[in-house]
Amino acid sequence: MGKPIRDSRAVDVPLAAECIAYYGEAIDKVYDEVAPTGPSDVVTLVREPLGVVGAVVPWNFPLLMASWKVGPALATGNSVVLKPAEQSPLTALRLAELAAEAGVPDGVLQVVPGFGETAGQALGRHMDVDLVAFTGSTEVGKLFLRYSGESNMKRLALECGGKSPHIVMQDCGDLDAAAEAAAWGVFYNQGEVCNAGSRLLVHESLKDELLERIVRVAETIRPGDPLDPETRMGAIVDRTQLERVLGYIDAGRDQGADLHLGGGQVLEESGGYFVEPTIFDAVSNEMRIAREEIFGPVLATIPFGDEEEAIEIANDTVYGLAAAVWTNDLSRAHRVSRALRAGVVWVNCFDRGDITAPFGGFKQSGFGRDKSIHALEKYTDLKTIWIAID
Ligand code: NAD
């Protein structure tokens, strides 16, 4: 899908393997419960597999997003029908081959490549699918809610889009670290990351200095051949997405934002779809580039005057996937993390995580959590077994 091979090797493959191993090792350490009823009864609360899980995943991390679903769904005793994105089906097919080789019985993990409107919708409307675990856009997430309501009321776990605020407070300690995090937070994986820090909210007193440092980092991130092991930024997944990203850059210009860096397609002679790291300054939160998910390497810089205003702008979005705040003040770090309406809040870092911590959104970024022990909950139903003793 255009990501640098370096990232596939260093990030996607090892994290996917870690995810599968984690759930394999976790499942015999999860206990059921006994309810604290009176002495005349014994009441057990047991978790049972749902049955058939449909996993519908996007193209931006084809292997990792599939693993986040397949790992906990299989560990809890379900069978899985995985539908990869039409742009990136080969990874999922390879995963299925490896699963067969590892001894997963026939029919327990199946991969059905196909388009969203056909294969995806068929899973969403199938009467024998008990849950769809979806990662993708908010628009398609809402379609799955409809499919469920119009079919068998199947359960849903929806990991959808984001427009994450990356807030740099006046008392940010290490401005170089913040600049590095802000740049990689939106340019990593060509910006095709659901939790990308695409809105940079910066205190007005620091804005020029911070932007200068972000530009210095961005200038070291040049798009290049994804198969070259030195490349740090690859190609946009396809022409449709390229046009979408370039369309947003035009919209930013047209609505009066100040193009500070980049803004163009590069390496056209290669036949690939490369976009340079792009930074807009003087963005207002009402502009389309601040409101809509671009899913490309485009940073929108929005200055603010005080903490209250920063929180207000940060939360003024339909999304709530992730957020970050840079501050040296411990009380402010706690206060702001609580006030931000997002499923993940980073303090003095960006996009850190591991398999032990849940990931997922508030508001129209969806519901249900991937990763950690909590991910197991959504793949099971809770049954009460009430046994009378006397
Ligand atoms: P998408 O919503 O277009 O597609 C996601 C999946 O849904 C694909 O498998 C696709 O084939 C399927 N699909 C598309 N239309 C469908 C329909 N009408 N009915 C049923 N299925 C359909 O998203 P995308 O372009 O592949 O990926 C980008 C989106 O994914 C972004 O919005 C991004 O934020 C989101 N994403 C979210 C997370 C997260 O964890 N929250 C992670 C990665 C990506």
Image (spheres, grey):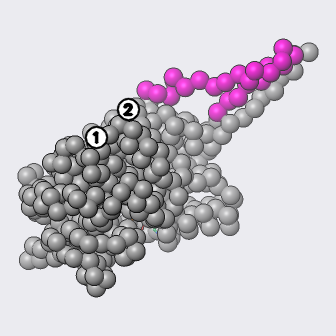
| Residue 211: % across, % down | 17, 61
Q: Nearer the viewer, residue 123 or 386?
A: 386
Q: Is residue 20 left or right of residue 54?
A: left
Which residue is at 13% across, 56% downward? Answer: 213
The quarter of the rendered structure image containing the C terminus is: top right
Sooner in the amino-acid sequence: mark 2 or mark 1: 2
Give the quarter of the image for residue 2.
Answer: bottom left
Q: Which residue is mark 2?
A: 21
Which residue is at 45% across, 41% downward? Answer: 358
Q: Does residue 155 appear anywhere in the picture?
A: yes
Check if residue 281 falls in the magenta segment.
no
Q: Nearer the viewer, residue 321 or 62?
A: 321
State how far apart marks 2 and 1 are (Cα). 37 Å
| Residue 379: % across, % down | 57, 42
Which residue is at 70% across, 29% downward? Answer: 45
Q: Does residue 314 appear anywhere in the picture?
A: no
Magenta span of residues: 25-47
Above or below residue 25? Residue 325 is below
Q: Which residue is mark 1?
A: 328
Above or below residue 159? Residue 326 is above
Give the quarter of the image for residue 59.
Answer: bottom left
